[in-house]
Amino acid sequence: MRKVTIFGSTGSIGENTVDLISRDPSAYDVVALTGGRNVARLAEQAVALNADLAVTAFEDCFEELKALLAGTGVDVAAGASAVNEAAERPADWVMSAIVGAAGLMPGMKALEQGKTLALANKESLVTAGPILLGHAQTHNATVLPVDSEHSAVFQALVGEDIKSVERIIITASGGAFRDWDPKDLHKATLEDACTHPNWDMGQRITIDSASLFNKAMELIETKEFFGVRPDQIEAVVHPESLVHALVGFNDGALMAHLGAPDMRHAIGYALHWPDRAHIDVARLDLTQIATLNFRTADPDRYPALRLAREVMEAGGLAGAVFTAAKDAALDAFIARQIGFTDMAEVVDATLSTLSGEIAASGQLSLDSVLAADHLARKTAQNIIAAR
Ligand code: NAD
Ligand code: MG
């Protein structure tokens, strides 16, 4: 039996992971599940999967979780440090599916066991890519991408030499506003931004898909994960979301990865890697699909992509500043303090304000990344308050 732990089990990626694991319960020994405020669901999962430990990230949710799991034999804990401690329990395969910067530390801790980290939490790579991947190397651990585009690139690279790669193209659905006139985008409401044309995901990533901040993060994630230059990475809008990514080689060949927009593909690939296992998701019928469309990702419509280029070129702490500023701007948009197009302006202004700190980054350390995260959040909040 493989020992597995799922960080963020109650989220969209977490639920899909639980779904795959619960289809074959005799194959897995569930060590720990962690969630946030949805303790009812966390308790339900812990019982259904017979987990050893259930952790809520929030201390004020402890009593409720404890009551729900009384008499079940599942250990209960709460708080950010308890989430990190869950990463110390031996596991062969760990899913990192917490949303936001809170996903970094549990991922780092899990790597210290020298096993496999399935990485959905893209913020870890964007803020601290070299640290996370360096830590994996130090501890002889494997990091597998779970983001669908990066899983697609990873699969296209099996048996290939990264040196023969000319370019990596990741696709973007274009989000909720892909057919809106750019002049109207400032009017977009929270409700408008919370619907995704193709994928069913958590609220934050759905809004980030509408603004293309999600794609911006994925460009940076591509640079960090595959170690290619920024000018080798492109994004194209592909409304059908069936081609997830393409890898172009130096002989002109372009390898595309296609699949239904269902995260269980990428999660299942990471779960069974290096093998492939039967996964019961929809199969594509190419004659039904008939046409696939691709469009330029217009930088006027999507300023987040321009900012991603700046961040990739700057390197160092730019990714941490970018992620934290984006998070603060997203919080403010969700709280209806700022409008949809203000988010990119806030991130842009934060990057400019902290350009001196970014230029002086030097060798990244966990401390410098956490300090930059803190400073960028505060700076972005001040910029928001002054608007
Ligand atoms: P989600 O919001 O649905 O779930 C997030 C999970 O993290 C929940 O279990 C929540 O309880 C937990 N959580 C929230 N705040 C926390 C905190 N402070 N500390 C500890 N746990 C906390 O998010 P999601 O859509 O599943 O995305 C998870 C990650 O995977 C994100 O980094 C996202 O960018 C990435 N991702 C998601 C998808 C997708 O299809 N949903 C695809 C690719 C990548
Ligand atoms: Mg993705």
Image (tube, rainbow, N blue to C red):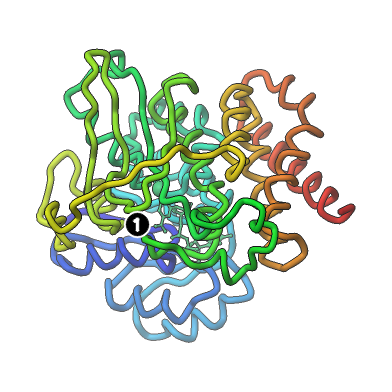
Q: Secondary structure at mark 1?
A: strand
Residue at (49, 37) in percent of width and height: 125
Image quadrant where one finds the N terminus:
bottom left
Residue at (34, 34) in percent of width and height: 141
Q: Amino acid at mark 1?
A: Thr
Front-most of 201 and 5? Answer: 201
Query: Could you tell me residue 193's position as x and y percent?
Result: 56, 64
In the rendered image, is residue 243 in sight?
yes
Mark 1 — residue?
5
Query: Could you tell me residue 296's position as x and y percent?
Result: 45, 37
In the rendered image, is residue 92 in sight?
no
Residue at the farthest right position = 386
- Residue 363 vertical position relative to residue 239 in the rendered view, above or below: above
The image quadrant that residue 51 belongs to is bottom left
Front-most of 352 and 272? Answer: 352
User: Mark 1 packing: few (<14 Cα in 10 Å), some, or many (20+)?
Assistant: many
276 sits to left or right of 122: left
Query: Could you tell me residue 360's position as x and y percent?
Result: 74, 20
Residue at (41, 38) in percent of width and height: 236
The image quadrant that residue 150 belongs to is top left
Query: Could you tell me residue 275's position as x and y percent?
Result: 13, 42
264 sits to left or right of 130: left
